[in-house]
Amino acid sequence: MTASLLHAQDIGISFGGLKAVQGFSLQLPAGGLYGLIGPNGAGKTTVFNLLTGVYRPDKGAMQLAAQNLMGRKPHEITAAGVARTFQNIRLFPNLTVLDNVRLAGQLRHRAGLGATLFRTAGYQRQEESLTRKCFELLGIFGMQDRAHELADSLSYGHQRRLEILRALATDPKVLLLDEPAAGLNPQEKKALALSIRQIRDRFQVAVLLIEHDMGLVMDICERIVVLDHGVTICEGPPNVVQNDPKVIAAYLGGG
Amino acid sequence: MSTSTPAATPPDLAPFRPVGPIGGMLPYVIGIALAFALQLLAPKFLDRYTARIVMDTGIAVILAVSLNIVNGMTGQFSIGHAGFMTIGGYTAGMITYYGSFFLWGSFAKHGAMLGSGEWLFAASCVVGGLVAAGLGYVVGLPSLRLRGDYLAIVTLGFGEILRVVLQQTGKVIDDGAALRAMPLTKWFPPPVGGAVGFDGIPKYTNLFWVYTFVTLTLVVAFRLKHSSLGRAMISVREDEIAAQAMGVNIARQKVLAFVMAAFFAGIAGGLFAHEGGVIISPKDAGFQRSFDYVIMTVLGGRGSISGVTLAAIILTVLPEMLRSVAEYRLIAFALLLIVMMLVRPQGLFGIHEIWHIRRKRA
Amino acid sequence: MADFTQTLMTAIAIGSLYALIALGYTMVYGILKFINFAHSDIVVLGGWLSYTIATSPLRVPWLGWQLGYNLNPQSPTPPLWVAVEILIRVMLLCGLIGFTIERLAYRPLRRAPRLNVLITAIGVSLFLQNLGQLDFVFGASPEKMPALLPSWELASFSFGSGESTRKVVISLVDTMIFATSAVLMLVLEYLVFRTKLGTAMRAVSFNTDTAALMGIPVDRVISFTFVLGSMLAAAAGFLYVMKYPGMNQPAHTVWVLLGLKAFVAAVIGGIGNVRGAVLGGFVIAAVEQFGAFYISSNYRDVYVFALLIGILLVKPTGLLGSPLREKV
C-alpha cells in the first residue's frame, strides 16, 4: 500500500447555516486515479475549492506528502504541487492558447524585474525553454497549430482540453479535474479517458476526478468516493460503489 | 489522441529577441538618440507653441501608458493617477528649487544644455518617481481587498486627500537668507505654495528629457507586457481565481502594477512641474485630471500600449487644435466615453497592439 | 456645550441631505450593481434648477402658466407654498432626467461588465457637469439663491451665563431641511418595505433574472428606481441651496464632493441597504462636522475619505450590509 500523497482529514466548511461539506476525508496515493461523484449540489466542487485553498476549511487537516496545506493561499498550494481545472471553464480569453499554458508553466521560473526589462541572456534562455516545454504540452491534444489563437476562439471541447494542459504545465504532483468530460460527445469522452490515463502514466501525477458520466468514472477510476449533501456516503472500488444501496438511493432520490 | 510531433520553436519569440547582450540596451539607446536629435532639430522646424504641445503630448503618453499598466494589464480601475503625478512633480520641484539654492546659491535655472542643472533636474524627476512609487505601494495595498467600483472610489479619494493636504502647505520661500536660517522643523509642512501652487520652479523641461523618459516608459511597458511578468499581470485582469490556481500571486502583481505605474507618473509629474508656463498646484492631484488619463486608456483600449499612446496623442493635440471651442472639450470627451461604451467598449484596439489587428480577424 | 450643540444641529441638517443623496446611490447599486457617478450631478441640477425656476421671469401667457417666480436675492420672502411648488417641480424635472439617462446610457449596458457601466457613468457625470456650465444653460459663475424661507429662529438655547453666554439657534431652514428629508425618507421606507412595488424593487436587487421569471417588469422597476433616486437627489439639491444660498458653478468641486461624501455614506451604511444609507448619511455628517470643528476644518474632506478607506478595509460590506460570495 503506497503512502498517500494527498491527504485530507475531516475537512469541512459551512456557509452561514449551510454545512456544505462535513468531515471529508481522502487518501490519494501517488499515481492514483480516483473519482469523486455524487448528485448535483453534493459539494464536490466545494471539496476541490477546499483542497486548493479557494475556501479555507473550518476544520480538519490537509497535507501534500509532508507539506501542510491548511490555511495556505491558492497560489501557494499550486506551487506545492496541486493543480486543478474548473467546472465552468476559466481560461484567460484574451491570451493565446500558448500563453495560457506558459502562464501556468512559468510558476517554477520566477523572472526578476530587472531581467525582464533588460532582456538579459538568462531571461531569454528561460523564456525559450518555457516556450518549448509548453509548446510540447500542446501536442498532447494536437493543439500546436492553434498555439497563437486566442483561447476563447477555441471550440468548447478544445477549451476543456486546454484547461487540462494548462494545469499540467504547473508541474503538479496531483491533478484535480472538475468535470473534464462535460459537454463532450461519446467518442471525445473515450479519447479523454484514454488521455487521462496516459497523462497519469507519463507525468507521474495522481488524479482526482469529478464526473457525472458514470461510464467514464467506472472505466478509469481505481477508487471512487461518493458525496451526498456534503457527506461521504460510500468509498471503494467501482464495483462496490455501483452496487451500494445508499449510492443508488442518493442518485435516484429514494428514501 | 495524436502523438506529439515536436515542432520548431514557434515564431512567437523571434521578433522580440534582441541580439546579444547589447540588444537588451538597444531600444533604450535608440530612443535617447532620437530624443537628442529631436531636441537639436526642433528649433529649426517648430515654434515655441508647437514645441510645447509636443512636450505636453510626451508627458501625456507617459501618464497614459503607465496608467495602462494598472487599468489595462491588471484590470484594476484606478482614478487617482494624477495624484501620483502631482506628488512626483512637487518632490522634483522641491529638489530643483531648493536644491539649486543650496548648491549654487540661486533659485534660477542653472547651466547650459546637459549641464549640471539639467542633471539635477533629471535626478529630481527620478526621485519624484520613487516617491510616487512609494505612495503607489501604499495605495496598492488597499487594492488587494477591493474590487472594481470600490477600488475606483478609494483611488479617487486618495487623489482628493492629497489635494487637500497639498493645499495646507506653506508659502514658497524665495528669500535666501530666510532659507538658510530655517530650522529643520519648519520644513514640515513643506513650503510648496499651498493652494496657489508651486511657483518659481526652474523650467528645465525640454524635448530631449521628455522624450528620453517617453522612451523609457514605452520600452518598459512593452517589454513588461510581452514577458512572463506581463502574462501574470494580464491573467489577474482576465480571471483572478484562475490566475491564483495557476500559481500567480495576485497580491504581488496588483501592488507591483501600482508601484510601477506610480513611478512613471511621478516622473511625468516632474517633467510637468518644470515645464515652461506651468505652475503645478494641488488641483492637479484631483480626479478631474485623473479622468483625462482614464479617458485615454479607455479610448485606446485598456491593455494596448500603442492604442493608449495614440489616444494620448489624439486627446492632447486635438483640444489644442480646437482651442476656439474649448468649453466644449469636456462635453465632447464625456460623449466620447458614453458612445464608446455603447458601441466599442474595448476601446480602439482592446488589449491588442495596433499591428495585431489583422491577426485577430483570422 | 454650546459649540457641541450647534455642531450637532448642523450635522443633523447636513446628515439629512447626505442621507437623501445616499439613498439614490444605494438603490441604484442594489439593483444594477454599479456606482452611478452621475447621481451627484442630479443634486447639482436640483440646486441650479431651483435657482433658475425661482429667478426666471418666464411666463407662458396664453396658458397663464408662471414658469418662473421672478425672485431675486433682494425680494421679500415669498409665501411657503412657493417653496413647496418649486421643490415639487424640481423633483419632477429631475425624475424625468434620471429616467432619460437610464434609458439612453445605462439600459443598453444591462448585461455589460460592471466596469463598462462605471465608465459610462463617469461619462454621463462629466457631460452633465459641463453641459451645466455652458452659458445658455446655467453658466460658469456663482449665483446667489433668493431666500424662499424666512430666516426665523424657531428656538434658541443659552449656555453659560454673563460674559460667556453662548446662544445656539435652531433655525427654520435647518428644521425644514430635516423635516422635509424625514418625510421623504419615511415615504421611501413605506414604499420599499410595504408596497408591492417596493417588494419588486427588492426582488430585482437580489436577482434580476429570477425576478423577471417571476413576472416582475424588470425594466419598469429599474426605471422607477432611477426616477425615485433622482427625485430624492433633486430634493437634496433644493434643500442644499436653501441652506447655502451662495451657489458655486455646476462643475465646482464643492458639488462633486457633496455627492462623493454621500456615496461614502451609502458605502458605510452598507451599499444596497436603504436603511443603511440613512444611517450612513448621519454618520458621515457627524464625522465631518465634529472633525472640522474639534480637529481642523482644513481637513474636512479628508476625514470622510479616511473613514471610507477604514471601513472598506475592516468591514467592506458596511454597517448594515451583508457579505457577498463569488461562486467558483
Image (cartoon, rainbow, N blue to C red):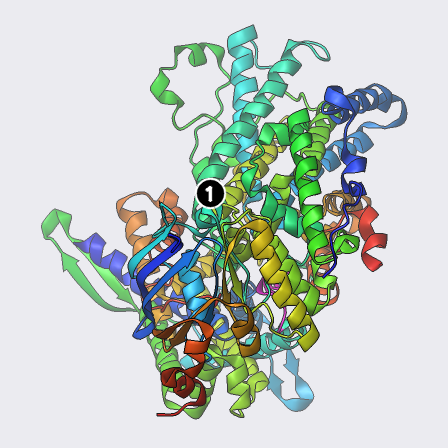
C112 falls in the magenta region: yes
Q: Which residue is mark 1?
A: B139
The quadrant where residue B225 appears:
top right
- Residue at position x 45%, y 80% in the image: A242
* B47 versus A177 height, above or below: above
**Horizontal placement of C37 versus B327: left or right?**
left
The quadrant where residue B361 appears:
bottom right
**Horizontal placement of B94 versus B118: left or right?**
left
B100 falls in the magenta region: no
Q: Amino acid at mark 1?
A: Val
Binning the other alpha carbons within 10 Å of mark 1 as few (below 14), some (14 to 19) or many (20 upward) gives: many
* SS type, badge 1: helix
Where does residue A191 sit, x and y in percent of width and height? Answer: 67, 67
Q: Which residue occupies the extreme left position in the image?
A: C161
Q: Nearer the viewer, residue A13 or C249?
A: A13
**Horizontal placement of C143 versus C195: left or right?**
right
- Residue at position x 71%, y 41% in the image: A132
